[in-house]
Amino acid sequence: MQTKQNIKQDQVAVIPIYPNEIDKYWGLVHFLIAEALKYGGSYANPNHIKEELEKDRMQLFIMFGEDSDGENKVFGCMTTRIFQNPNFKELQACICTGKKMELWIDSLIVALEKFAKDNNCKRICMLGRPGYKKFVSDYGWKVKHYEYQKEIK
């Protein structure tokens, strides 16, 4: 009988995908982005996001690693955008989705902070589900606002 292996954190990497590489990797994240958009109220469709990524108005990070049976796979993805406020720039996390967040959250936070610093952003912000709090609190992230929504028909 084969014992089940646990995935180690260092087996999952956060890979930034450049605008000229979006087509190459889109098939790996399209379904994740489609599901996240559906959950988020369908404010856009995946092709809108792809276009923003290709035009470098948004950025894509893929969480890629090895699963317990040795297969390489995508554990999740994140899209961001750099927003110029009147007084400073901030990196806004738009979509964050995937499985087994505990395996890639360390690498994602490091990648986001480096990307923000490299682009002269003063802060990183994210709207997220309540469950994200347990992951990001350990990294110094604080809840500043809640988002409440009402659909108008």
Image (spheres, helix red, strand yellow):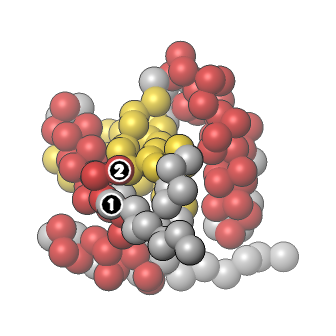
Q: Does 93 sit above or below residue 151?
A: above
Q: Does 4 sit above or below residue 56?
A: below
Identity of the residue drawn at 43% across and 67% down: 5
For the residues labelled 2 and 1, say whether their Cβ atoms are less than 8 Å apart: yes
Task: Tell me if 44 is positioned left or right of 57 in this view.
Answer: right
Identity of the residue drawn at 44% across and 47% down: 65
Q: Secondary structure at mark 1?
A: loop
In the picture, which quadrant includes the C terminus? Answer: bottom right
Label 2 is placed on what type of residue? Gln
> Is 12 or 54 nearer to us in this picture?
12
Give the image location of residue 145, x and y in percent.
Answer: 35, 78
Q: Residues within 10 Å of mark 1 (few under 14, many from 20)?
A: some
**Furthest residue in direction top, as rendered:** 20
Label 1 is placed on what type of residue? Lys
> Is 8 or 83 nearer to us in this picture?
8
Q: Which mark is residue 8?
A: 1
Q: Secondary structure at mark 2?
A: helix
Q: Residues within 10 Å of mark 2 (few under 14, many from 20)?
A: few
Task: Tell me if 114 is positioned left or right of 147 in this view.
Answer: left
| Residue 60 in view (yes/no) | yes
Give the image location of residue 35, x and y in percent.
Answer: 70, 60
Q: Which mark is residue 11?
A: 2
Identity of the residue drawn at 53% across and 16% down: 20
> Is 133 or 104 nearer to us in this picture?
104
Give the image location of residue 4, x and y in percent.
Answer: 49, 71
